[in-house]
Amino acid sequence: LPIYDLWHERVVHKLQESGFSYLYEKVKGEVIFKTRTEFIDGLGRSRISVCFPKSITHKSQSGGITTMTHRYLQSIASKCLILGIIPDEMKELFGYDPGITVDMDDPAGQINEILRNFNDYIPLIEKNYTNCLNNHDWSNRWIVIKDIITEKLKWNREE
């Protein structure tokens, strides 16, 4: 099984048995939230957002590149704690590790532990939220992209 499916398989029943609400695609490829409003409401009510890069969830679409997806930023903007695999690019863009790396040996135990001690994660959630608002909108992203292109063009001229 791919890592994401393996992780999911290890948590779904244990979390349900513990009485936690765990929203996931019950049928592969079926969207959990049918409308934008449902998505915003669902993410807004969530404490933890499980995020894996496309290089893990949709290998054929990623081109082998591990990068931050919109879901990471949407989750942070919704003040969710990110649990998953945090791409190195994201750590570089934030200047720190903005998430919690999944424990593949005991993922349900890890989630239970996080939820029991959720207040300990509020400073990280707030730091991520502030960082996202200040540094990760499209005007900021455009500056980063422009700088990369400018540097690449400069490098190519020097060859």
Image: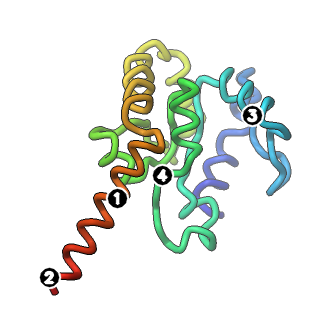
Q: Is residue 65 above or below residue 49?
A: below
Q: Earlier in the sequence, mark 2 or mark 4?
A: 4
* Direction from residue 36 to residue 75 in the image, left or right: left
Q: Which mark is residue 146?
A: 1
Quarter of the image with the C terminus in it: bottom left
Query: Do the residues bearing badges 2 and 4 touch, measured as CB atoms within 8 Å?
Result: no
Q: How many marks?
A: 4
Q: Which residue is mark 2?
A: 158
* Direction from residue 105 to residue 36 in the image, left or right: right
Q: Earlier in the sequence, mark 2 or mark 1?
A: 1
Residue type pointed to by label 1: Lys
Residue type pointed to by label 4: Met
Secondary structure, mark 1, is helix
Q: Is residue 97 above or below residue 47?
A: below
Q: Which mark is residue 131?
A: none
Q: Earlier in the sequence, mark 1 or mark 3?
A: 3
Q: Nearer the viewer, mark 2 or mark 4?
A: 2
Q: Which mark is residue 68?
A: 4
Secondary structure, mark 2, is helix
Q: CA distance from mark 2 to mark 1?
A: 18 Å
Residue at 53%, 24% in the rendered image: 79
Q: CA distance from mark 1 to mark 3?
A: 31 Å
Q: Which residue is mark 3?
A: 39
